[in-house]
Image: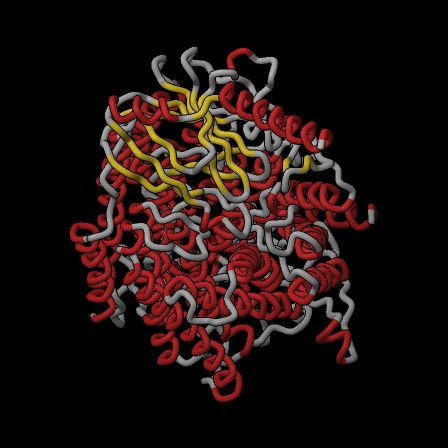
């Protein structure tokens, strides 16, 4: 190894000598890129079906595996939400729906969507597929560990779904799993259900850590020549920063799941004070439920950004490509991602303003929370400023981007309501909160996922998705989802509390019956519309228009592989060499409206590139 | 073209919905009008930003949608514009935060003349305790709770003897007199919430939490549990009556105090003993 290093150093020294010694007046080589410091990666190429498609070490296959399994659990989450909406809009319509079932569905829907769907999909799915391709690596740096990561996730999902079939059913303690109720009778699934939930989370975190280390080290160590950090696409920046957050935040979830399991199984009292149940004092004492909330939200708030930052990154790239314009304020965008990531560790207790924690915390966490609004707002401005004076292709991908901007700004603004401690007091634990986080963390990231699917499907499959079906899919989803969650905020204003199986006949709540029916109906339609995408994917895989190379005329590396779809190892014999950032669209003087990252300056000398 | 129009309709629709919505605040019945004001301010500022950003987006869609041969502008950065946007956003955010913090300061500092109300929660119900003539509540302990001492009052605590016990989920409050709600729970998290009073706080087992408000409208209100507490959560309701001073006085005089309860129990014990003695004599 050390010899290799010495060799490359000599090569470097020689080459610079040749440059300066080339003539009487030294002309620096404008195409010069520092040589690689590490030898090319050796990859294990699978030969059998099992090693190629099942226990596969190719990050792209692992990415697709993550994507499919996360989508599968996401569909389960969707079906659960239908059942909940059926009860809320039309109480009693489903005969089997008891309060126990309702709360179990609420809990599983929440946990599945946040952790097993969104997190797994953005980091496991898009992260695996895009990081090596976008940074010009052959694969993740630890392909074997990467494979194990997926299969841990697989087992975690298995354990989670197994809880539907154990006595007592899955836990019904709400996705936040607050003790003491999570482990006491009186909450559905307080036996095996909650234990399996904790075990599944522990497995998920363990598996995710394996993947996460891969993403981090690949970004830090395996980038190709010329791919400096400030030339990375924002997608990679988003996923990278989100992974840093995940590495720091998930341990808090891990310990809280572990301590809760101990409280349940061994009757330790980490989170359990003295409790009176049916006239008997239980064996617990000395713990505090608020500790769990701190641990949970120390994970739970960064978790929001673990989902949001990759979405921010991806949407930036999609908007830039389809506006034929460089992302506005790239450096600001990178710093905003990093600053949001860092700040996200100082805002967790804004979920706990009315939890009974020390009231003075309110001042601190309200301030940090509103500070985080500033870099977030900067990102929004930069997205719309990227559209400004662009040449916007109004294709399906762009529609999802526009939908994202509307829903994200809407959900971000309601976040300012809830982050501002006083405003949170009347609104917390009402439907305003439900509407807020579904808009900002459900619908907005979903818009990004959909945009990303329509954008990168041609790369993964080599064929285009149907634009016509895509547009139907978008309009039903966007208009439907918006009409679910926008009016739902107003239920919160009335004071309708969340997690109510039935509303009964409080006068101010009965006024909302009609709205609940409307919301439920819209939810059924939006959910059903997602099957348009599945149909589109299945049909397009067979008869979609062949994509060819770089169908969107994009700059970033993933579109520049020698074969489409890219093969294992990504780059054929020779790794790409990067000469510029990925946003050279519509550069004055250039023949075309895009200059791929691999184009050396000598080929486009007549252009006026401001940044490389 | 239709893309821009649909997005425009969504934005205009949102604003119209907000103006004409039949679903909005329940009529406030406490002193926390300042919370509503903070929300209204946030609506103006936040709503303004939402409309402005979205309208700008729609403008871009109309003005800059794809035309063959046109080239987008190439301008990677605009330091000045970014600076203006950063500082104006910071200013806007500060303008929202300041009133929020001021009202929060009022929320956590209870006025001196507030009446303490012990709200005790369990799966799934409420009961209340008010101070007697001494104006002080006796201290309690979960382990002390039993049929004879439903609130778990520590017997040695002199302050507890005249406490007024309300073993029912119906509480009465005096109009225009601040109350300090002291929350405790014997099992899991709960939250005593009356939408018309705006205020809320979790009841946490193992500790006592508080908040305060001043009811200012005579009437009947529904109490909702606002922190998920297990399968009976949605049924955990209660009622509050806000009454005029005289009505309140009449009501509280009818209620049983802790010493009444102890006396009654002694009587029962005595008569039971007597009964047992008589039986023995027979």
Residue A574 visible, this orientation: no
Question: Based on the displayed image, in which of its 4 quarters is residue B243 positioned?
Answer: top left
Residue B82 visible, this orientation: yes
Question: Based on the displayed image, in which of its 4 quarters is residue B133 positioned?
Answer: top left
Classify residue B150 as left or right of residue B128: right
Q: Residue drawn at (37%, 61%), measured in percent from left and top?
A: A401
Question: Based on the displayed image, in which of its 4 quarters is residue B244 positioned?
Answer: top left
Q: Nearer the viewer, residue B40 or A463?
A: B40
Scheme of colours in the image: secondary structure
Q: Residue drawn at (20%, 53%), measured in percent from left and top?
A: B21
Task: Give the image location of residue A146, x and y in percent.
Answer: 71, 60
Task: Give the image location of residue A147, x and y in percent.
Answer: 73, 63
Task: Give the image location of residue A441, x and y in percent.
Answer: 45, 53
Q: Nearer the viewer, residue A356 or A533?
A: A356
Residue located farthest toward the front when viewing the structure as drawn: B282
Q: Nearer the viewer, residue B43 or A6?
A: B43
Q: Residue drawn at (55%, 28%), measured in percent from left and top?
A: B151
Classify residue A361 as left or right of residue B20: right
Residue B122, above or below B256: below
Marker count (numbered): 0
Residue located farthest toward the bottom when viewing the structure as drawn: A543
């Amino acid at each position: 190894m050390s010899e290799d290093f010495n060799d490359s150093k000599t090569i470097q020294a020689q080459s610079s000598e040749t440059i300066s010694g080339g003539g009487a007046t030294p002309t620096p080589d404008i195409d010069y890129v520092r040589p690689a410091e590490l030898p090319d990666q050796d990859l294990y190429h699978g030969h059998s079906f099992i090693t190629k498609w099942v226990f596969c070490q190719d990050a792209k296959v692992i990415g697709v595996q993550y994507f499919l399994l996360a989508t599968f659990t996401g569909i389960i989450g969707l079906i659960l939400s239908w059942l909940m909406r059926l009860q809320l809009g039309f109480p009693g319509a489903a005969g089997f729906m008891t309060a126990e079932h309702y709360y179990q569905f609420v809990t599983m829907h929440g946990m599945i969507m946040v952790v097993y769907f969104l997190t797994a999909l953005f980091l496991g799915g898009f992260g695996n597929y895009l990081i090596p391709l976008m940074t010009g690596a052959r694969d993740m740096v630890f392909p074997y560990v990467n494979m194990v990561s997926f299969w841990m996730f697989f087992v975690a999902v298995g354990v989670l779904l197994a809880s539907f079939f154990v006595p007592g059913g899955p836990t019904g303690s709400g996705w936040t799993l607050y003790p003491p109720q999570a482990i006491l009778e009186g909450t559905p699934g307080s036996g095996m259900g909650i234990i399996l939930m904790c075990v599944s989370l522990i497995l998920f975190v363990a598996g995710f850590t394996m993947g996460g280390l891969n993403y981090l080290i690949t970004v830090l160590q395996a980038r190709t020549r010329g791919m400096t950090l400030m030339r990375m696409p924002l997608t990679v920046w988003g996923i990278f920063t989100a992974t840093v957050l995940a590495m720091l935040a998930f341990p808090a979830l891990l310990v809280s799941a572990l301590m809760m399991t101990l409280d349940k199984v061994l009757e330790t009292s980490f989170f359990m004070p003295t409790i009176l149940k049916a006239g008997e004092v239980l064996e617990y004492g000395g713990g505090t439920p608020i500790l769990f909330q701190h641990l949970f939200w120390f994970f739970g708030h960064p978790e929001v950004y673990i989902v949001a930052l990759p979405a921010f990154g991806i949407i930036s790239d999609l908007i830039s490509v389809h506006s034929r314009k460089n992302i506005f304020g790239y450096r600001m965008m990178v710093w905003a991602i990093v600053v949001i990531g860092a700040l996200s560790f100082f805002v967790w207790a804004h979920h706990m303003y009315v939890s009974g924690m020390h009231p003075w915390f309110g001042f601190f966490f309200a301030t940090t929370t509103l500070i985080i609004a500033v870099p977030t707002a900067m990102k929004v401005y930069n997205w719309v400023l990227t559209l400004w004076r662009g040449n916007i292709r109004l294709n399906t991908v762009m529609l999802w981007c526009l939908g994202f901007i509307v829903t994200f700004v809407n959900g971000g603004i309601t976040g300012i309501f809830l982050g501002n401690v006083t405003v949170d007091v009347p609104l917390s634990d009402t439907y305003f909160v439900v509407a807020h986080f579904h808009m900002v963390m459900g619908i907005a990231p979903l818009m990004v996922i959909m945009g990303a699917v329509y954008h990168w499907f041609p790369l993964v499959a080599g064929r285009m998705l149907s634009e016509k079906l895509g547009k139907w899919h978008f309009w039903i989803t966007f208009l439907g989802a918006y009409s679910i969650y926008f009016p739902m905020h107003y239920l919160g204003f009335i004071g309708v509390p969340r997690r109510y199986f039935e509303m009964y006949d409080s006068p101010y709540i009965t006024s909302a019956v009609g709205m609940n029916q409307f919301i439920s109906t819209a939810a059924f339609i939006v959910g059903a519309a997602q099957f348009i995408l599945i149909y589109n994917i299945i049909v397009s895989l067979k008869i979609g228009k062949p994509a060819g190379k770089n169908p969107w005329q994009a700059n970033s590396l993933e579109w520049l592989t020698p074969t489409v779809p890219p093969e294992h190892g990504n780059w054929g014999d020779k790794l790409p060499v990067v000469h510029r950032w990925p946003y050279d669209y519509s550069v004055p003087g250039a023949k075309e409206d895009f200059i791929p990252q691999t184009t050396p300056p000598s080929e486009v000398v007549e252009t006026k590139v401001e940044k490389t | 073209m239709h893309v821009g129009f649909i997005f425009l309709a969504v934005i205009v629709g949102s604003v119209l919905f907000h103006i004409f919505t039949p679903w909005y605040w329940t009529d406030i019945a406490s002193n926390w009008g300042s919370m509503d004001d903070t929300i209204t301010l946030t609506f103006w500022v936040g709503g303004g930003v939402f409309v402005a950003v979205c309208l700008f987006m729609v403008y871009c869609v109309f003005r800059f949608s794809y035309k063959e041969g046109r080239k987008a502008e190439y301008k990677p950065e605009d330091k000045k514009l970014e600076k203006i946007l950063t500082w104006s956003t910071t200013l806007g955010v500060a303008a929202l935060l300041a009133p929020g913090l001021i009202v929060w300061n009022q929320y956590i500092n209870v006025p001196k003349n507030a009446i303490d109300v012990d709200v005790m929660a369990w799966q799934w119900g409420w009961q209340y305790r008010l101070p007697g003539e001494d104006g002080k509540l006796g201290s309690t302990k979960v382990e002390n709770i039993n049929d004879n001492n439903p609130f778990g009052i520590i017997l040695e605590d002199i302050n507890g003897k005249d406490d007024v016990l309300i073993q029912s989920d119906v509480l009465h409050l005096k109009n225009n007199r601040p109350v300090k709600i002291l929350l405790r729970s014997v099992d899991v998290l709960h939250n005593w919430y009356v939408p018309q009073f705006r205020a809320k706080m979790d009841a946490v087992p193992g500790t006592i939490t508080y908040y305060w408000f001043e009811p200012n409208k005579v009437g009947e209100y529904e109490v909702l549990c606002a922190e998920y507490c297990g399968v009976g959560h949605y049924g955990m309701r209660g009622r509050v009556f806000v009454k005029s001073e005289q009505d309140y006085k009449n009501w509280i005089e009818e209620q049983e105090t802790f010493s009444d309860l102890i006396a009654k129990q002694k009587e029962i014990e005595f008569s039971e003993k007597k009964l047992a003695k008589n039986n023995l004599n027979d």
